[in-house]
Protein backbone atom coordinates (compact mmCIF):
# COMPACT_ATOMS: atom_id res chain seq x y z
CA UNK A 1 0.00 0.00 0.00
CA UNK A 2 1.16 3.55 -0.69
CA UNK A 3 1.45 4.74 2.88
CA UNK A 4 2.42 8.39 2.78
CA UNK A 5 0.19 9.20 -0.18
CA UNK A 6 -2.99 7.93 1.44
CA UNK A 7 -5.69 10.52 1.95
CA UNK A 8 -6.50 11.25 5.62
CA UNK A 9 -9.02 8.73 6.92
CA UNK A 10 -9.05 6.66 3.72
CA UNK A 11 -8.46 2.91 3.51
CA UNK A 12 -7.24 3.00 -0.09
CA UNK A 13 -4.06 4.56 -1.44
CA UNK A 14 -4.17 7.94 -3.14
CA UNK A 15 -1.23 8.82 -5.38
CA UNK A 16 -0.18 12.40 -6.03
CA UNK A 17 2.14 14.18 -8.41
CA UNK A 18 5.56 15.43 -7.35
CA UNK A 19 6.79 18.72 -8.81
CA UNK A 20 9.56 21.06 -7.63
CA UNK A 21 10.04 19.11 -4.42
CA UNK A 22 6.36 19.38 -3.46
CA UNK A 23 3.38 17.03 -3.54
CA UNK A 24 0.37 18.22 -5.52
CA UNK A 25 -3.19 16.98 -6.00
CA UNK A 26 -3.72 19.20 -9.03
CA UNK A 27 -6.05 17.83 -11.68
CA UNK A 28 -9.04 15.51 -11.33
CA UNK A 29 -8.98 12.48 -9.05
CA UNK A 30 -9.21 9.20 -10.97
CA UNK A 31 -9.81 5.67 -9.75
CA UNK A 32 -7.45 2.82 -10.55
CA UNK A 33 -9.09 -0.57 -11.15
CA UNK A 34 -7.81 -4.12 -10.94
CA UNK A 35 -7.55 -5.71 -14.41
CA UNK A 36 -8.25 -9.07 -12.77
CA UNK A 37 -11.53 -8.16 -11.08
CA UNK A 38 -12.51 -4.66 -12.14
CA UNK A 39 -12.61 -3.56 -8.50
CA UNK A 40 -11.26 -0.20 -7.34
CA UNK A 41 -7.72 -0.27 -5.93
CA UNK A 42 -7.30 3.39 -5.04
CA UNK A 43 -7.19 6.86 -6.54
CA UNK A 44 -4.61 9.12 -8.12
CA UNK A 45 -4.27 12.77 -9.07
CA UNK A 46 -4.48 12.99 -12.85
CA UNK A 47 -2.27 15.66 -14.36
CA UNK A 48 -2.17 17.42 -17.69
CA UNK A 49 -0.90 20.58 -19.33
CA UNK A 50 -0.83 22.56 -16.06
CA UNK A 51 1.36 19.96 -14.36
CA UNK A 52 3.58 19.66 -17.44
CA UNK A 53 4.16 23.42 -17.56
CA UNK A 54 4.93 23.59 -13.83
CA UNK A 55 7.30 20.63 -14.09
CA UNK A 56 9.17 22.13 -17.06
CA UNK A 57 9.61 25.44 -15.20
CA UNK A 58 10.86 23.66 -12.09
CA UNK A 59 13.31 21.56 -14.06
CA UNK A 60 14.62 24.62 -15.92
CA UNK A 61 15.17 26.52 -12.65
CA UNK A 62 16.92 23.56 -11.04
CA UNK A 63 19.21 23.14 -14.02
CA UNK A 64 20.26 26.80 -13.83
CA UNK A 65 20.31 27.36 -10.06
CA UNK A 66 21.58 24.14 -8.47
CA UNK A 67 24.93 22.38 -8.61
CA UNK A 68 23.33 19.31 -10.18
CA UNK A 69 24.61 19.78 -13.74
CA UNK A 70 28.19 20.40 -12.55
CA UNK A 71 28.59 18.06 -9.56
CA UNK A 72 29.30 14.45 -10.57
CA UNK A 73 29.60 13.28 -6.98
CA UNK A 74 26.17 14.68 -6.12
CA UNK A 75 24.62 12.90 -9.09
CA UNK A 76 26.24 9.59 -8.21
CA UNK A 77 25.22 9.90 -4.58
CA UNK A 78 21.59 10.57 -5.53
CA UNK A 79 21.39 7.62 -7.92
CA UNK A 80 22.96 5.25 -5.38
CA UNK A 81 20.59 6.52 -2.70
CA UNK A 82 17.57 6.11 -4.99
CA UNK A 83 18.62 2.51 -5.63
CA UNK A 84 18.77 1.91 -1.89
CA UNK A 85 15.35 3.51 -1.38
CA UNK A 86 13.87 1.32 -4.09
CA UNK A 87 15.44 -1.79 -2.59
CA UNK A 88 13.82 -0.93 0.74
CA UNK A 89 10.38 -0.81 -0.89
CA UNK A 90 10.92 -3.58 -3.41
CA UNK A 91 8.23 -5.88 -2.04
CA UNK A 92 5.64 -3.07 -2.06
CA UNK A 93 6.42 -2.32 -5.69
CA UNK A 94 6.20 -6.00 -6.66
CA UNK A 95 2.84 -6.47 -4.94
CA UNK A 96 1.34 -3.28 -6.37
CA UNK A 97 2.55 -4.05 -9.90
CA UNK A 98 0.88 -7.44 -9.72
CA UNK A 99 -2.40 -5.94 -8.53
CA UNK A 100 -2.62 -2.84 -10.71
CA UNK A 101 -0.66 -3.78 -13.83
CA UNK A 102 -1.70 -7.45 -13.89
CA UNK A 103 1.81 -8.90 -14.03
CA UNK A 104 2.28 -12.21 -12.28
CA UNK A 105 4.41 -11.92 -9.15
CA UNK A 106 7.52 -13.40 -10.78
CA UNK A 107 7.31 -10.86 -13.62
CA UNK A 108 6.76 -7.97 -11.22
CA UNK A 109 9.78 -9.08 -9.21
CA UNK A 110 11.78 -9.40 -12.45
CA UNK A 111 10.91 -5.81 -13.38
CA UNK A 112 11.99 -4.33 -10.05
CA UNK A 113 15.10 -6.47 -9.88
CA UNK A 114 16.06 -5.17 -13.33
CA UNK A 115 15.50 -1.60 -12.21
CA UNK A 116 17.68 -1.28 -9.11
CA UNK A 117 20.96 -2.22 -10.86
CA UNK A 118 20.26 0.37 -13.58
CA UNK A 119 20.27 3.12 -10.96
CA UNK A 120 23.57 1.85 -9.58
CA UNK A 121 25.12 1.41 -13.03
CA UNK A 122 24.38 4.99 -14.01
CA UNK A 123 25.43 6.21 -10.58
CA UNK A 124 28.85 4.72 -11.33
CA UNK A 125 28.90 6.24 -14.82
CA UNK A 126 28.12 9.65 -13.37
CA UNK A 127 31.51 9.47 -11.66
CA UNK A 128 33.62 7.76 -14.30
CA UNK A 129 32.42 8.83 -17.77
CA UNK A 130 34.76 11.44 -19.27
CA UNK A 131 35.68 13.09 -22.55
CA UNK A 132 38.98 12.81 -24.45
CA UNK A 133 42.11 14.95 -24.59
CA UNK A 134 45.20 14.87 -26.81
CA UNK A 135 48.07 17.02 -27.99
CA UNK A 136 47.29 16.82 -31.70
CA UNK A 137 50.50 18.63 -32.70
CA UNK A 138 53.19 20.39 -30.68
CA UNK A 139 51.60 23.12 -28.62
CA UNK A 140 48.04 22.41 -29.85
CA UNK A 141 45.70 20.60 -27.53
CA UNK A 142 42.26 19.20 -28.42
CA UNK A 143 39.68 18.20 -25.83
CA UNK A 144 36.12 16.92 -25.98
CA UNK A 145 33.86 17.61 -23.04
CA UNK A 146 30.49 15.98 -22.37
CA UNK A 147 27.89 18.34 -20.95
CA UNK A 148 24.27 17.73 -19.93
CA UNK A 149 21.74 18.50 -22.64
CA UNK A 150 19.53 20.44 -20.20
CA UNK A 151 15.93 19.57 -19.35
CA UNK A 152 14.98 16.03 -20.33
CA UNK A 153 11.39 14.87 -20.78
CA UNK A 154 10.85 11.16 -20.16
CA UNK A 155 7.56 9.62 -21.33
CA UNK A 156 7.23 5.97 -20.33
CA UNK A 157 4.41 3.43 -20.89
CA UNK A 158 2.21 1.38 -18.56
CA UNK A 159 3.43 -2.11 -19.55
CA UNK A 160 6.60 -1.88 -17.41
CA UNK A 161 6.35 1.57 -15.86
CA UNK A 162 9.10 1.33 -13.25
CA UNK A 163 11.95 -0.17 -15.27
CA UNK A 164 11.15 1.74 -18.47
CA UNK A 165 10.96 5.04 -16.62
CA UNK A 166 14.25 4.41 -14.80
CA UNK A 167 15.90 3.13 -17.99
CA UNK A 168 15.50 6.67 -19.40
CA UNK A 169 15.72 8.96 -16.39
CA UNK A 170 18.73 7.28 -14.73
CA UNK A 171 21.09 8.13 -17.63
CA UNK A 172 19.51 11.58 -17.89
CA UNK A 173 20.30 12.22 -14.22
CA UNK A 174 23.78 10.72 -14.55
CA UNK A 175 24.47 13.08 -17.46
CA UNK A 176 23.49 16.08 -15.32
CA UNK A 177 20.08 16.79 -16.83
CA UNK A 178 17.05 17.72 -14.83
CA UNK A 179 13.99 15.62 -15.62
CA UNK A 180 10.25 15.80 -16.18
CA UNK A 181 8.78 12.29 -15.94
CA UNK A 182 5.32 11.61 -17.36
CA UNK A 183 3.69 8.23 -16.65
CA UNK A 184 0.27 6.96 -17.78
CA UNK A 185 -2.94 6.65 -15.81
CA UNK A 186 -3.25 2.88 -16.21
CA UNK A 187 -0.62 2.50 -13.46
CA UNK A 188 -1.45 5.57 -11.39
CA UNK A 189 -0.80 3.88 -8.03
CA UNK A 190 2.48 2.26 -9.09
CA UNK A 191 3.53 5.65 -10.43
CA UNK A 192 2.77 7.24 -7.07
CA UNK A 193 4.92 4.73 -5.21
CA UNK A 194 7.81 5.39 -7.62
CA UNK A 195 7.36 9.14 -7.03
CA UNK A 196 7.56 8.51 -3.28
CA UNK A 197 10.89 6.74 -3.71
CA UNK A 198 12.17 9.65 -5.78
CA UNK A 199 10.92 12.20 -3.23
CA UNK A 200 12.59 10.29 -0.40
CA UNK A 201 15.97 10.59 -2.14
CA UNK A 202 17.43 13.37 -0.01
CA UNK A 203 20.44 13.87 -2.30
CA UNK A 204 18.18 15.15 -5.10
CA UNK A 205 17.80 18.95 -5.09
CA UNK A 206 14.22 20.17 -5.48
CA UNK A 207 13.20 20.44 -9.11
CA UNK A 208 15.76 17.96 -10.44
CA UNK A 209 13.08 15.22 -10.72
CA UNK A 210 9.50 16.27 -11.45
CA UNK A 211 6.86 13.58 -11.89
CA UNK A 212 3.23 13.56 -12.96
CA UNK A 213 0.65 11.03 -14.11
CA UNK A 214 -1.57 11.75 -17.10
CA UNK A 215 -4.50 9.76 -18.45
CA UNK A 216 -5.27 12.22 -21.24
CA UNK A 217 -3.10 13.88 -23.82
CA UNK A 218 -2.51 17.53 -23.03
CA UNK A 219 0.67 17.44 -20.94
CA UNK A 220 2.75 15.11 -23.09
CA UNK A 221 2.49 17.25 -26.26
CA UNK A 222 3.76 20.25 -24.30
CA UNK A 223 6.77 18.25 -23.14
CA UNK A 224 7.59 17.48 -26.76
CA UNK A 225 6.97 20.93 -28.28
CA UNK A 226 8.23 23.22 -25.51
CA UNK A 227 11.46 25.10 -26.34
CA UNK A 228 12.30 24.79 -22.62
CA UNK A 229 12.71 21.01 -23.00
CA UNK A 230 16.03 20.07 -24.57
CA UNK A 231 15.70 16.31 -25.16
CA UNK A 232 12.85 13.79 -25.16
CA UNK A 233 13.00 10.07 -24.37
CA UNK A 234 9.87 8.13 -25.30
CA UNK A 235 9.05 4.44 -25.09
CA UNK A 236 5.82 3.35 -26.74
CA UNK A 237 4.10 2.76 -30.06
CA UNK A 238 5.51 3.57 -33.47
CA UNK A 239 2.40 5.60 -34.32
CA UNK A 240 2.90 7.91 -31.35
CA UNK A 241 6.63 8.04 -32.04
CA UNK A 242 5.88 9.56 -35.45
CA UNK A 243 3.65 12.19 -33.84
CA UNK A 244 6.42 13.03 -31.35
CA UNK A 245 8.93 13.48 -34.19
CA UNK A 246 6.57 15.87 -35.96
CA UNK A 247 5.85 17.90 -32.82
CA UNK A 248 9.53 18.10 -31.88
CA UNK A 249 10.64 19.23 -35.34
CA UNK A 250 10.12 22.99 -34.85
CA UNK A 251 12.55 23.02 -31.90
CA UNK A 252 14.99 20.49 -33.44
CA UNK A 253 15.39 18.74 -30.10
CA UNK A 254 17.11 15.34 -29.96
CA UNK A 255 14.85 12.33 -29.54
CA UNK A 256 15.44 8.88 -28.10
CA UNK A 257 12.59 6.63 -29.23
CA UNK A 258 12.11 2.95 -28.49
CA UNK A 259 9.01 1.99 -30.43
CA UNK A 260 7.05 -1.06 -31.52
CA UNK A 261 8.32 -4.52 -32.30
CA UNK A 262 7.35 -7.68 -34.14
CA UNK A 263 10.14 -9.99 -33.04
CA UNK A 264 10.76 -13.10 -35.21
CA UNK A 265 11.75 -16.28 -33.35
CA UNK A 266 13.56 -18.32 -36.02
CA UNK A 267 13.66 -22.05 -35.27
CA UNK A 268 15.91 -24.17 -37.50
CA UNK A 269 15.62 -27.93 -38.10
CA UNK A 270 18.52 -28.71 -35.78
CA UNK A 271 17.13 -26.80 -32.78
CA UNK A 272 16.46 -28.55 -29.48
CA UNK A 273 12.66 -28.34 -29.31
CA UNK A 274 12.63 -29.37 -25.65
CA UNK A 275 14.49 -26.14 -24.95
CA UNK A 276 12.67 -24.07 -27.57
CA UNK A 277 9.02 -24.67 -26.68
CA UNK A 278 9.11 -23.39 -23.05
CA UNK A 279 10.97 -20.23 -24.07
CA UNK A 280 8.71 -19.52 -27.04
CA UNK A 281 5.72 -19.95 -24.74
CA UNK A 282 7.21 -17.43 -22.30
CA UNK A 283 8.03 -15.13 -25.21
CA UNK A 284 4.32 -14.96 -26.05
CA UNK A 285 2.89 -14.87 -22.53
CA UNK A 286 5.38 -12.76 -20.52
CA UNK A 287 3.68 -9.52 -19.45
CA UNK A 288 0.62 -11.03 -21.21
CA UNK A 289 2.28 -10.22 -24.53
CA UNK A 290 2.25 -6.51 -23.71
CA UNK A 291 5.96 -6.12 -24.38
CA UNK A 292 7.80 -4.52 -27.30
CA UNK A 293 10.09 -7.57 -27.50
CA UNK A 294 7.29 -10.17 -27.36
CA UNK A 295 8.21 -13.17 -29.52
CA UNK A 296 5.18 -12.56 -31.69
CA UNK A 297 6.37 -14.33 -34.87
CA UNK A 298 7.43 -17.99 -34.84
CA UNK A 299 9.33 -18.94 -37.99
CA UNK A 300 9.78 -22.73 -38.20
CA UNK A 301 11.93 -24.57 -40.71
CA UNK A 302 9.92 -27.12 -42.64
CA UNK A 303 11.57 -30.22 -41.14
CA UNK A 304 10.35 -29.43 -37.59
CA UNK A 305 7.34 -27.23 -38.40
CA UNK A 306 4.63 -29.85 -37.80
CA UNK A 307 6.07 -30.96 -34.48
CA UNK A 308 6.71 -27.40 -33.28
CA UNK A 309 3.22 -26.26 -34.29
CA UNK A 310 1.62 -29.11 -32.34
CA UNK A 311 3.81 -28.65 -29.27
CA UNK A 312 3.27 -24.89 -29.18
CA UNK A 313 -0.51 -25.27 -29.42
CA UNK A 314 -0.50 -27.69 -26.48
CA UNK A 315 1.88 -25.51 -24.46
CA UNK A 316 -0.20 -22.36 -24.94
CA UNK A 317 -3.43 -24.19 -24.12
CA UNK A 318 -1.92 -25.36 -20.83
CA UNK A 319 -0.90 -21.88 -19.60
CA UNK A 320 -2.51 -21.12 -16.22
CA UNK A 321 -4.20 -17.72 -16.51
CA UNK A 322 -5.11 -15.98 -13.27
CA UNK A 323 -4.67 -12.93 -11.04
CA UNK A 324 -1.20 -11.43 -11.06
CA UNK A 325 -0.91 -11.69 -7.28
CA UNK A 326 -1.80 -15.41 -7.26
CA UNK A 327 1.45 -17.45 -7.08
CA UNK A 328 -0.21 -20.20 -9.17
CA UNK A 329 -0.76 -17.90 -12.17
CA UNK A 330 1.52 -18.30 -15.18
CA UNK A 331 -0.01 -15.36 -17.07
CA UNK A 332 -2.00 -12.48 -15.68
CA UNK A 333 -4.74 -10.33 -17.21
CA UNK A 334 -4.15 -7.68 -19.83
CA UNK A 335 -4.05 -4.08 -18.68
CA UNK A 336 -7.80 -3.55 -19.13
CA UNK A 337 -10.91 -5.03 -20.71
CA UNK A 338 -10.80 -2.72 -23.74
CA UNK A 339 -7.36 -3.99 -24.75
CA UNK A 340 -8.39 -7.62 -24.22
CA UNK A 341 -11.38 -7.09 -26.51
CA UNK A 342 -9.18 -5.33 -29.09
CA UNK A 343 -6.84 -8.32 -29.26
CA UNK A 344 -9.78 -10.72 -29.48
CA UNK A 345 -11.12 -8.83 -32.50
CA UNK A 346 -7.72 -8.98 -34.23
CA UNK A 347 -7.57 -12.76 -33.82
CA UNK A 348 -11.18 -13.17 -34.95
CA UNK A 349 -10.50 -11.06 -38.06
CA UNK A 350 -7.41 -13.18 -38.82
CA UNK A 351 -9.69 -16.18 -39.29
CA UNK A 352 -10.67 -14.75 -42.68
CA UNK A 353 -7.15 -15.05 -44.10
CA UNK A 354 -5.20 -17.37 -41.78
CA UNK A 355 -5.52 -20.63 -39.85
CA UNK A 356 -6.25 -20.36 -36.13
CA UNK A 357 -4.06 -23.09 -34.64
CA UNK A 358 -4.89 -22.32 -31.00
CA UNK A 359 -7.84 -20.01 -30.33
CA UNK A 360 -7.36 -18.53 -26.92
CA UNK A 361 -9.72 -15.64 -26.48
CA UNK A 362 -11.51 -13.87 -23.68
CA UNK A 363 -11.85 -16.01 -20.59
CA UNK A 364 -15.15 -14.28 -19.85
CA UNK A 365 -16.72 -13.26 -23.19
CA UNK A 366 -20.03 -12.09 -21.72
CA UNK A 367 -21.11 -8.55 -22.55
CA UNK A 368 -20.45 -6.19 -19.68
CA UNK A 369 -17.67 -8.29 -18.17
CA UNK A 370 -14.95 -6.21 -16.50
CA UNK A 371 -12.04 -8.63 -16.16
CA UNK A 372 -9.22 -8.42 -18.72
CA UNK A 373 -8.24 -12.08 -19.01
CA UNK A 374 -7.24 -13.28 -22.45
CA UNK A 375 -5.91 -16.74 -23.22
CA UNK A 376 -2.94 -16.95 -25.65
CA UNK A 377 -3.54 -17.63 -29.34
CA UNK A 378 -1.48 -19.05 -32.22
CA UNK A 379 -2.31 -18.11 -35.84
CA UNK A 380 -0.66 -19.74 -38.88
CA UNK A 381 -0.10 -17.48 -41.88
CA UNK A 382 1.41 -17.86 -45.34
CA UNK A 383 0.90 -14.35 -46.72
CA UNK A 384 3.42 -11.91 -45.26
CA UNK A 385 1.08 -9.02 -46.03
CA UNK A 386 -1.45 -10.35 -43.49
CA UNK A 387 -2.45 -7.71 -40.92
CA UNK A 388 -1.70 -10.08 -38.03
CA UNK A 389 1.90 -10.24 -39.31
CA UNK A 390 2.39 -6.58 -40.14
CA UNK A 391 0.68 -4.98 -37.12
CA UNK A 392 1.89 -5.07 -33.53
CA UNK A 393 -0.82 -6.92 -31.59
CA UNK A 394 0.50 -6.07 -28.10
CA UNK A 395 -1.14 -9.09 -26.56
CA UNK A 396 -0.48 -12.85 -26.11
CA UNK A 397 -0.79 -13.75 -29.78
CA UNK A 398 1.88 -15.26 -32.05
CA UNK A 399 1.89 -16.03 -35.74
CA UNK A 400 3.34 -19.26 -37.11
CA UNK A 401 5.19 -19.27 -40.44
CA UNK A 402 7.05 -22.06 -42.24
CA UNK A 403 10.32 -21.41 -44.09
CA UNK A 404 12.68 -23.57 -46.11
CA UNK A 405 16.19 -22.10 -46.33
CA UNK A 406 18.25 -19.59 -44.38
CA UNK A 407 17.63 -17.03 -47.11
CA UNK A 408 13.88 -17.64 -46.83
CA UNK A 409 14.03 -17.19 -43.05
CA UNK A 410 15.94 -13.92 -43.36
CA UNK A 411 13.56 -12.56 -45.98
CA UNK A 412 10.55 -13.40 -43.84
CA UNK A 413 12.10 -12.07 -40.64
CA UNK A 414 12.84 -8.72 -42.29
CA UNK A 415 9.45 -8.40 -43.97
CA UNK A 416 7.84 -5.96 -41.51
CA UNK A 417 8.49 -2.28 -40.78
CA UNK A 418 9.78 -3.21 -37.33
CA UNK A 419 13.32 -4.08 -36.29
CA UNK A 420 13.59 -4.16 -32.52
CA UNK A 421 14.70 -7.73 -31.77
CA UNK A 422 14.98 -11.26 -33.14
CA UNK A 423 15.92 -14.70 -31.86
CA UNK A 424 17.70 -17.61 -33.60
CA UNK A 425 17.40 -21.22 -32.42
CA UNK A 426 19.99 -23.67 -33.74
CA UNK A 427 22.81 -26.04 -32.72
CA UNK A 428 24.98 -24.85 -35.61
CA UNK A 429 27.72 -22.68 -34.07
CA UNK A 430 28.33 -20.74 -37.30
CA UNK A 431 24.73 -20.01 -38.24
CA UNK A 432 23.94 -17.33 -35.60
CA UNK A 433 26.59 -14.91 -36.87
CA UNK A 434 25.81 -15.66 -40.52
CA UNK A 435 22.05 -15.16 -40.11
CA UNK A 436 22.21 -12.57 -37.35
CA UNK A 437 24.22 -10.15 -39.46
CA UNK A 438 21.49 -10.22 -42.09
CA UNK A 439 18.62 -9.57 -39.68
CA UNK A 440 17.38 -5.99 -39.47
CA UNK A 441 17.07 -5.86 -35.69
CA UNK A 442 18.74 -3.93 -32.90
CA UNK A 443 19.11 -7.02 -30.69
CA UNK A 444 19.61 -10.61 -31.86
CA UNK A 445 19.62 -13.50 -29.39
CA UNK A 446 20.77 -17.06 -30.02
CA UNK A 447 19.10 -19.93 -28.13
CA UNK A 448 17.60 -17.45 -25.65
CA UNK A 449 15.24 -14.48 -25.53
CA UNK A 450 14.75 -11.15 -23.73
CA UNK A 451 18.21 -10.98 -22.20
CA UNK A 452 19.19 -7.34 -21.70
CA UNK A 453 22.38 -6.09 -20.08
CA UNK A 454 22.79 -2.65 -18.53
CA UNK A 455 26.27 -2.19 -19.99
CA UNK A 456 25.20 -2.97 -23.58
CA UNK A 457 22.94 -0.84 -25.71
CA UNK A 458 19.54 -1.78 -27.06
CA UNK A 459 17.24 -0.10 -29.55
CA UNK A 460 15.50 -0.50 -32.85
CA UNK A 461 16.18 -0.55 -36.57
CA UNK A 462 13.66 0.80 -39.10
CA UNK A 463 10.35 1.88 -37.53
CA UNK A 464 11.28 0.49 -34.11
CA UNK A 465 13.00 3.65 -33.00
CA UNK A 466 15.87 6.10 -32.86
CA UNK A 467 18.87 6.18 -30.57
CA UNK A 468 19.89 3.64 -27.96
CA UNK A 469 19.14 2.87 -24.32
CA UNK A 470 21.49 1.29 -21.76
CA UNK A 471 25.27 1.46 -21.86
CA UNK A 472 27.43 4.46 -22.71
CA UNK A 473 25.33 5.39 -25.72
CA UNK A 474 22.28 5.47 -23.47
CA UNK A 475 24.08 8.11 -21.42
CA UNK A 476 25.10 9.95 -24.58
CA UNK A 477 21.45 10.46 -25.57
CA UNK A 478 21.31 13.09 -22.80
CA UNK A 479 24.62 14.81 -23.45
CA UNK A 480 26.06 17.49 -25.71
CA UNK A 481 29.65 17.11 -26.88
CA UNK A 482 31.82 20.20 -26.86
CA UNK A 483 35.13 20.31 -28.73
CA UNK A 484 37.70 22.69 -27.19
CA UNK A 485 41.00 23.56 -28.83
CA UNK A 486 43.85 25.27 -26.98
CA UNK A 487 46.99 26.64 -28.55
CA UNK A 488 49.89 27.48 -26.27
CA UNK A 489 50.87 31.16 -26.34
CA UNK A 490 53.78 31.89 -28.68
CA UNK A 491 57.07 31.30 -26.98
CA UNK A 492 55.49 29.40 -24.09
Image: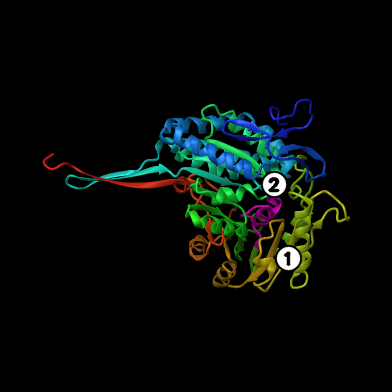
Camera-nearest label, 1 or 2: 2
Image x and y of residue 278, in percent: 68, 53
| Total marks placed | 2
Q: Pointers 1 and 2 in contact (CB under 8 A)?
A: no
The boundaries of the magenta stretch are 276-297
**Residue drawn at (69%, 49%), measured in percent from left and top?**
216
- Name the N-terminal-most of marks 1 and 2: 2
Q: Quadrant of residue 259?
A: bottom right
| Classed neighbour count for the residue bearing mark 1: other residues with Cα under 10 Å, few (<14), some (14–19), many (≥20) | many
In this rendered view, identify the residue nearer to me: 467 or 83. Answer: 467
Quadrant (top left/top right/bottom left/bottom right) for the N terminus: top right
In the structure shown, which secondary structural element does the residue marked by tag 1 occupy?
A: strand
Label 1, label 2: how far apart the Cα atoms are: 33 Å
The vertical placement of 479 against 21, above or below, is below
Mainly helix, strand or loop, the magenta region? helix
In this rendered view, identify the residue nearer to me: 288 or 14. Answer: 14
| Classed neighbour count for the residue bearing mark 2: other residues with Cα under 10 Å, few (<14), some (14–19), many (≥20) | some
Q: Which circle marks residue 379 in the picture?
A: 1
Image x and y of residue 333, in percent: 76, 48
Image x and y of residue 480, in percent: 41, 47
In this rendered view, identify the residue nearer to me: 452 or 279. Answer: 452
Does the magenta portion include 285?
Answer: yes
Does the magenta portion include 150?
Answer: no
Q: Which circle marks residue 154 in the picture?
A: none
In this rendered view, identify the residue nearer to me: 299 or 136. Answer: 136
Q: Which residue is mark 2?
A: 215
Image x and y of residue 348, in percent: 79, 65
**Residue drawn at (58%, 49%), measured in percent from left and top?**
222
Q: Is residue 422 visible?
A: no
Amino acid sequence: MIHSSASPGSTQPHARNYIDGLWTDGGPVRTSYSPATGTALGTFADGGETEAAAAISAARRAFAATAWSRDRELRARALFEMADRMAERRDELVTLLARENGKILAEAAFEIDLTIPKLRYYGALALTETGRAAEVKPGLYSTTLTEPAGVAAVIAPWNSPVVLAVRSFAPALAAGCTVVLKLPGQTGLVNGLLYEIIAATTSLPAGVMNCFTESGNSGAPLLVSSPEVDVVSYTGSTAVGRVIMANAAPTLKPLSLELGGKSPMIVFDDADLDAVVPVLTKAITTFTGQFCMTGSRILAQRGIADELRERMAKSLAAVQVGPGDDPASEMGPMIDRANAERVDRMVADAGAYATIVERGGLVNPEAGAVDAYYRPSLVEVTDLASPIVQREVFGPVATFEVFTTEADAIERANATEYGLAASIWTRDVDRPLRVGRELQAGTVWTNTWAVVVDQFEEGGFKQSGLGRLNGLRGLGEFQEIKHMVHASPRGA
